[in-house]
Image (spheres, rainbow, N blue to C red):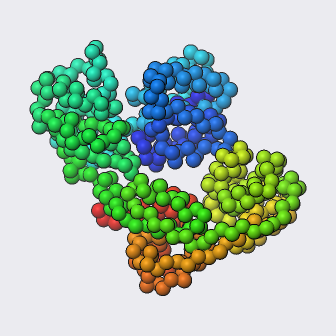
Amino acid sequence: MTVYIVGSGPGDPELVTLKAKRLVEEAEILIYDRLVHEEILNWVNPECKIIYMGKRDEKLKSSQQIQKEINSTLIKYGHKYRVVRLKGGDPFIFGRGGEEALVCKNAGINFEIVPGISSFYAVPAYAGIPITHRKFNSVFAVLTGRESIKAKSAINWEKLPETIIVLMGVSEIQEISKKLLKIGRKKSTPVAAISWGTTPKQQTKMTTIGNLAEGIEDLDPPTIFVIGSVSKLHEKLNWFEKKLEKLKEKKVVIARAKNHANEGAEILNSYKIKPILMPLIEIIYREFELPDLNDFDAIVFTSVEGVKRVSQKVDLRTYNGEIFAIGPKTKNYISQNFGLKANIGKKYNSKGLGKHILQNLNQMSKVLLLRSSAATKTLKNMLSTKFDVSSISVYDIRSLPANPDIVKEADAVFVMSASCAKSLSTLDKKILEKPVIVSIGPETSKHLAIPHLIAKEFTFQGIFNTYLNYIWSEKL
């Protein structure tokens, strides 16, 4: 088979190339390290084996030992499987991608290189620093901190251009500043230190070569240093951190089921947004009789809760038919807990799921829907045109009152289901005029009689991205 050595970009998952995303989705084995964004891992198919080989947590092992283990893993799986070796940035720029390609070559394993957007130019760009500018420079050098402090370094310090980008240099930055001062660089030369570039945690500190070790104590790696007069443009062109600043201390109400109230809060916290939990529905377990699942050609789950209820009565691993799920959250739960593959549609709602099932099952197949008693008739009506459909309600939903005082103080309200929309709509419309209301999809929007936004992707990340686009479209 083939090993694909793939660059995942500098951090922001939207900077991953289309080819890299496709290969991740098709991978049978995925090997990744700590600089790969977690959202990228959601793209893998349920049957893919995911192997973490990060170097940060292996304090008892040297980087050479860990690299040997990575090489052995590539050889172990590369002969038989479609392997994606996912690396931060670009695998051929200070990423040991060349070493791993040679390992594959020497072992007789097919390999391909998929370049990624490198942090050395992407991170400065997100800090508003062009690494070339006609008024400042036309050449630059890129160094690593580790190479900088070697006794027999390949770096000729006296011949370096005015603009220098230093990667992996937090622990070596004092030594680097000494060397630059020794060759005659002015103490006043500006330096930008950018940590966690292109992510919600991005932070830029401006300093000088003379004070390079001061004022950056709270910056954690990965940090990139841009040394030279061009870094001063950060003060004028700092676009990304200004966008992040607009989100700080925003109060966002998450209106969803009481049983899942905390889900999504971590994403908001990463942007320094204050999540406010307002459960508007509660899951109530009910008694139900479950037939032999293997009497059906396909079973369909429209929520994680449905999977949990059914798995309390039967071991899903004994089922031999097709499984369909409403979206990636339910699909991943089935995969992670039972090792089973669940199919999902291109759109994560009843219509999207129904369309996918209609296209992938034989006519007159027996289909069993396992869902809430409050579910709409949309999915069942679609499937009944072609299949023998049965439906079992495996749990009930009870509405909870919306708190007007919470909504009054909110900057935004994320409405996570149609049932939550019904509860929210009981409030006075004047109260609902202040916050930005964002619905998770068209089905939910049917129950909102007030102006609101609709997520393009029907997930929490999708609803959050819709809110971000709205906030960030306003003038900075």
Instruction: Say whether residue 232 is left or right of residue 245.
Output: left
Q: Residue 190 at what x, y percent from top left?
A: 17, 39
In percent of width and height, residue 118 lies at 39, 37
Q: Locate the C terminus and report the quarter of the image it occupies.
A: bottom left
274 vs 456, nearest the viewer: 274
Q: Is residue 106 above or below residue 70?
A: above
From this viewpoint, is residue 36 visible? yes
Identify which residue, 144 or 92, lies in the foreground.
144
Q: Is residue 122 above or below residue 384?
A: above
Q: Is residue 240 above or below residue 130?
A: below
Q: Is residue 229 left or right of residue 49?
A: left
Q: Who's the residue at 19% across and 36% down the image?
A: 212
Q: Say how many tags the image has.
A: 0
Q: Residue 214: x percent and y percent?
A: 20, 38
Position of the N terminus, as image quadrant, is: top right
At 64% across and 32% down in the image, what residue appears? 82
